[in-house]
Image (cartoon, helix red, strand yellow):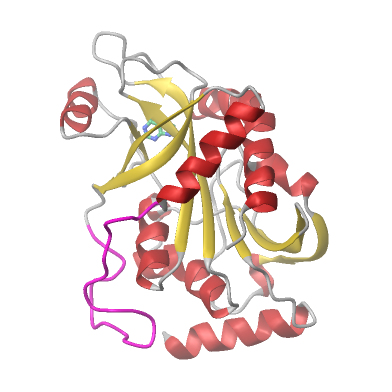
Amino acid sequence: MLEQIEFTTKSILEKTNQFKPQFGIILGTGLGGLVNEIKTDYAIPYKDIPNFPVSTVEGHSGQLIFGELGGKKVMAMQGRFHFYEGYNMQQVTFPVRVMKALGINTLIVSNASGGMNPSFEVGEIMIINDHINLFPTNPLIGKNINELGPRFPDMSEAYKKSYVELGKKIAKENNIKVSEGVYAGLSGPCFETPAEYRYIWRIGADVVGMSTVPEVIVAKHGGMDCFGISIVTDLGVEGVVQNVSHEEVQHIAKQQEPKMTLIVKEFVRLCND
Ligand code: HPA
């Protein structure tokens, strides 16, 4: 894996004339519009990046964007790799390894989720303050590569507290209602049954989705700090669980996109890490 990371990193540096980003952003559902805010210097389709998988799911086109956002140099993943697509955990998290190798120390992740917390509404924006890994596996399983991080990485602050505070401050100053809470990540691709929502709520999660957790685990393994933000696109609240479709998830996420975009842009501008 080390050789692959090195090879991919070298190839990207050549294609971008040695562009060194400071922030890595994974543009999940609802943050696609952020690309329009990035003053793009380079865009590389995943198919032109050695060792990169190609993303398959509808609504996620695949390329890496290098440019400027909020006065800082960023690298953004337009389209991420999901475990449910059939990629293994190493493939899902490979881009995060490459981010680290490019010198990035702050990872920003976004996603869409189902909300179990009864105080949440459809369209709620939640800043992630912790997660629960309900995937059937973990990207760090296997022989540890000491050059990449420790065997037993600390996860006591998976989502950096000062980042959560900064996110809340930005939201407040811009009159955007946000809450904070715990994201449970599981494999999908089924949405949850009412009993599963009830279970996930009872074990301590506020929202549930099919991404983010693997990437954050790998980021923490590599010593990076993470900021996560989620759009609640449907509710898994006891008694009000309704039919949910991918189209609806996309529709609600799209509605909230300007707010998500503003928060992330301001976050990058104001974060001095
Ligand atoms: N469950 C899992 N993932 C999701 C959901 C959900 O209810 N909504 C959007 N992504």
Q: Is residue 125 magenta?
A: no
Is residue 70 rendered to the left or right of residue 191?
A: right
* Residue 150, quarter of picture: bottom left
Identify the residue shown where x is 45% and y is 61%.
Answer: 225
Q: Quadrant of the N terminus?
A: bottom left
Up/down of 65 relative to 10, above or below: above
Which residue is depicted at the point 27% across and 57% down?
156
Q: Quadrant of ligand 1?
A: top left
Identity of the residue furthest to the top in this view:
239
Is residue 245 among what the camera can see? no
- State the image quarter where residue 192 is shown: top left
Highlighted range, magenta: 137-159
Looking at the image, residue 67 sits to the left or right of residue 134; the answer is right
Task: Name the spot of residue 135 as percent of width and height, x first.
Answer: 26, 51
151 is within the stretch colored magenta: yes
How many marks the image carries: the answer is 0
Q: Position of residue 269 (x, y in %)?
A: 70, 51
Residue nearest the observer in this picture, 221 or 215: 221
x then y, percent, for residue 112:
48, 35
Q: Is residue 126 visible?
A: yes
The secondary structure that dominates the magenta segment is loop
Q: Is residue 222 placed above or below 70 in the rendered structure?
A: below
